[in-house]
Image: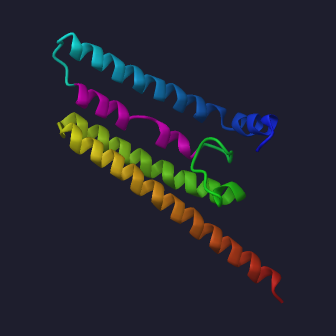
Amino acid sequence: MLPRFALAQSLRRSQKPYAMTWVAAIALLALVHSSSIFQVLGLPINGPRIIGVGAGLLVIGHCLGKVRRNPVFGIRTPWTLQSDRIWNQTNRLGGRLLFVLGLGGAIAAVVGAPGVVLSLVLGGGALIISVGMVIYSYRMWRSEAGQRRSRHQP
């Protein structure tokens, strides 16, 4: 377990992206709540479309590339936590992919994709990107380990 001051220090380096993501998540929850209330009141809104746009525009993907290595926030695998280079490259690539997925989801929601399809696309896309980033970080780590071994062999 990490000492409390080490955790605070590592998050302090990523304070702005962490705060932006926290605020965006709260805003999305407020949007979901408002949409639910409006539907219960019988107001003519398309809740799934509004929520789809909000979920698609969630700024996690945008912020991910700016997060510094820490044990709480970002793409945290055993390999990204061992190396700043692996952390930065994995989170930048993952952030770009998630941003494109979210933008595509928002556009799909605006043009009227059914809520179930939108949920499957966003959820499935996020799952595929997550698994891909685990594999990507592992392969980078293996490559870095191979380079270290070749430098130490006579």
> How far across and down, in percent of the image, does residue 5 sit?
81, 34
Task: Indicate left or right for 148 with 86 as reference.
Answer: right
Residue 5, magenta (yes or no) = no
At 46% across and 61% down in the image, what residue appears?
A: 132
At 24% across and 31% down in the image, what residue appears?
A: 49
| Nearer to us in this view, 101 or 29 | 29
Identify whether 68 is placed above or below 25: below
User: Bounds of the magenta span?
Assistant: 47-65
Quadrant including the C terminus: bottom right
Identify whether 99 is placed above or below 12: below
At 40% across and 26% down in the image, what residue appears?
A: 28
> How far across and down, in percent of the image, does residue 50 sit?
27, 27
What is the magenta segment's predominant secondary structure? helix
Residue 57, magenta (yes or no) = yes
The answer to whether any part of residue 133 appears in the image is: yes
Q: Which residue sits furthest top?
A: 41
The answer to whether any part of residue 83 appears in the image is: no
At 75% across and 34% down in the image, what residue appears?
A: 8
| Nearer to us in this view, 42 or 46 | 42
